Amino acid sequence: MSETIIGIDLGTTNSLAALVNEDGPEIIGPPEDPCMIPSLLSRNGSRWLVGEEAREHLIASPANSVYSVKRLMGRGFEELEEEIRELPYQVEEAQRKLVKIRIGEESFTPQELSSVILSRIKQKAETHLEKPFEKAVITVPAYFDDAQRQATRDAGKIAGLDVVRIINEPTAAAIAYGLDEKKQGYVAVYDLGGGTFDISILELKGKLFKVVATHGDTRLGGDDIDRVLVNLFQKSLLEQYPDLDLEDPSCRQVLRKTAEEVKIALSSSIETEYTLELPDKGISHKRILTAEELNLLLEPLLKRTFESCSKALSDAGLKKSDIEEVVLVGGSTLVPAVRKGVEAFFGRAPHVAIDPYKVVAIGAAIQGHLLAGGRRDFLLLDVVPLALGIETLGGTFSKVITANTSLPAEESEVFTTHVDQQTSIEINIYQGERELVQDCRSLGQFKLRGIPPMKAGFPLVEVSFKVDSNGLLTVSAFEKRSGTEAQIEVIPSHGLTQMEIDAIMEASFEHAVDDFNRRQLIEFQQSAERVFKGIELNWKVAEEVLSENQRLSIRKQMDVVKQTMTTDDAQILKAELDNLGDLTRPLADSAMGRAVLEELQQQNP
Amino acid sequence: MAYSDKVIDHYNEPRNVGSFDKNDDAVGTGLVGAPECGDVMKLQIKVENDQIVDAKFKTFGCGSAIASSSLATEWVKGKSIDEAMSIQNTEIVEELSLPPVKIHCSVLAEDAIKAAISDYKSRNNSETAEG
Amino acid sequence: MSEVSSKSFSCEGCGAKLVSCLFCFDCSSLQSISEESDYFSALGISSEFDVDPDLLEEKFQHIASELHPDFYLNSTPQEKRLSERASTLLNQAYDTLKDPFKRADYLMSLKCKNVKWNDRVLPPTFLQEMFTLQEELDEMLENQDQQGLLKMREVLENRFQDLESGLLPSFRMLDSVEEPETVLEKLQMNLNAERYLRRLLDRIKIEETT
Ligand code: FES
């Protein structure tokens, strides 16, 4: 069998993992306990509550709870100002204008918080698969820029994952869809997730899945639908209670939670009644909202998505009628208004056969299967989502690699010095589609050093921009006259340096426990304790049903287990624990030893 | 690198945008293009007694081309046509610290000055046939 | 001038004749990239202007499905690097050769390395026309004249067609003349004109999507 490479969809609202096994791609875990958690976090003392367990805390202790971390990934404090105001948790400015989320006395980078979600997914998957693994394919919105991709990769690293590939969510969906339906031709994937919107147009031709154009908005998604509703609630509350403090964190969480419920309710009915409960203020505010009213509220949001669609079509040189199929991805596409809008725009009913929640993780797992050498029946060719370039005169942006160039890609540009004996050059790298760098994302400053001292204008420094198959940029430089390799120092604008990542990993308590052997060891130690307790409790029974010899060997084996408990090999401990289980079986089999049986069953399924 | 305020200014607020009547005999018009990118630039000079007294331009092109032509019109004003003829694109590159990818934009400005001057000359030297 | 015959490559490993200079299908091995590896040999098609788009597509798919880094995840670091580089080259080759104007430009520099010709030639009065069109476009954009924009777009697209259809006959001629300069200049004229027209079309496209 090929090695295990799982696919993880690290979503704004939900995160889940899938794997290809003999029966094909599947969400990991049994249907009643799938490897899928809400992307929610809550700090309880020095412990993280993740997913469902964090949900209850969200309202009870909003300041310690975090959601939608994905929106903050790889972004700077300044550009987030507007969004930060909407968030009930505290976001502060950290070094190099990065953001950190403050929880009590501690503060965390978005990368760290995402890594906590990823660790939990990893743990869950390992428990279900009964083996440790490290390799994973993680998906990101197609329109994520380099900084956001790097941040995702770093989050994986901190969680102890080897992120072998980062692929785009719509592309992942297209893989799952394309292999499933065996379709050919142009397919548009409309992906409206919790916090981002993407449109990708792919050409499915033979074995090839070729992305021809992609466009999107990393600040538009289901959260915005919620926000539209929250605004509506606020207005309606203020009409009745003009002095109400809407900024109060628990009030915000209540409104947000209700918005989510209303959105879900209106997915299947034409109107819904909701109540805003603010018990500490003695408010119980009941209202009705119809699906039609919601549609009107959503119109401006949808219009923005269709503008992206038009841009992608035009980049691909296609007309709407060239599209063979429109595939919907992302939980927000379950909202009927969204579906209707898409249908009206493309002039055809969208395809919804695969669960829009799961399709991305499934696609990532299929890509993981291919990377692991498990198949060769398709090949994904993705593109650079946004042009990469450098700052030139007066803050203008000069593209070096244009958007929609197939990956991997490389371009080079020759630079020179302006002053005699100059030995270093600084280059500012940006990513975006606009004319001015102030409208693009700064990826970082590159300092080329070690240029041999020469007359001004004489050195020819060839700087190569490489974008690898993950869509990640690396820059290298070479001075052609002297043949020397220039050194590059990268100062990421919105990311962590290698040193910062190392420091986080070292400090990360979660990471230490994450080691699979250690976790198993702890588990087996705990079950040994339980078994010991069970044996002691039933020793009276043992004296009745077991022979002296049997009892003696149980005691002996208990000592062996105790000894192995102090070593650090989980597998040996498991074996000795199994031996103990065999010896106590006669005791467990007796009706009176039922309690022991139950204890042992928990440990020996 | 940081760009000087003056340079940013030339981009944000280009000077001397506009045009003169090209049939005026005191006016020389240069129309040039950069085949590298498809940008076009029109630069006009107004001459009195061999002195360039005014200049205007209109550029359909990138920011560097706009700044280069803005700078070029500032420079030629007050110069004699012979002095203006000697303006080199490298001076523009230096003044605006243009990177290698943008050198052709400064070439465009130099070409435009030369073209405008030769247009002026050709219409004022009756012995030179119209070109 | 005689046609530069397509180069032939053999495998560094097993010596078999190569279809693509990047990969040996006989012994499934990546080949190192050299100065000789041009876009045509990367895709395994002969170096001439007349390229069958279906064949190009087929070759690209076939070769890409061997070179792609996805298939070298567990290979040696050298192989990984080679696969990234070869895939990059293949992508560049495909992007260049599938566009007739880029293909023409590439082929001219490939075939006529040692010939010098005027690379800034344009049809007479062409610049004046472009300048006027740009000004007209400015006006249409200002007045939101959708009708006018649509019309201009159509005119531009027809002109692309005309320029494109001029390329093949010129390349045929290039192979048979002794002094290639005039033919090269004629080709160059088409390529240069294309860029000015493209600039106009891009402005219209940006307008359409915003
Ligand atoms: S890019 Fe064309 S003149 Fe600058």
Image (cartoon, rainbow, N blue to C red):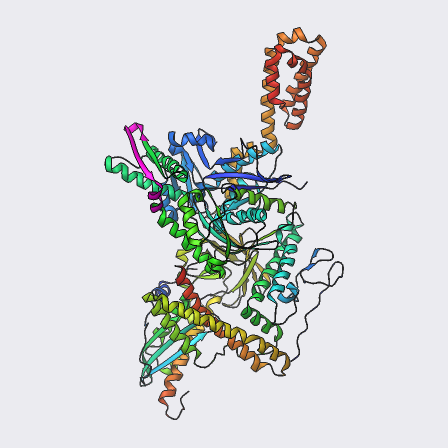
Query: Horizontal and vertical percent for residue C135?
Result: 36, 72
Toward the top, the furthest residue is A544
Residue situated in front as seen by the camera: A264 or A90: A264
Residue situated in front as seen by the camera: A35 or A54: A35
Q: Is residue A285 magenta?
A: yes
Q: Is residue A582 magenta?
A: no
Left-right relation of A11 to A479: left
Picture residue at 51% right of the left edge, 68% below the top? A455
Q: Quadrant of residue A515?
A: top right
- Above or below for A462 versus A61: below
- Above or below for A76 versus C156: above
- Above or below for C7 versus A169: below
Q: Quadrant of residue C179?
A: bottom right
Query: Horizontal and vertical percent for residue A89?
Result: 38, 37
Question: Is any part of residue C202 visible from this angle?
Answer: yes
Picture residue at 73% right of the left edge, 61% below the top? C11
Residue situated in front as seen by the camera: C123 or A315: A315
Toward the bottom, the furthest residue is B127
Boundaries of the magenta span: A277-296
Query: Horizontal and vertical percent for residue A563?
Result: 65, 20
Picture residue at 41% right of the left edge, 80% below the top? B114
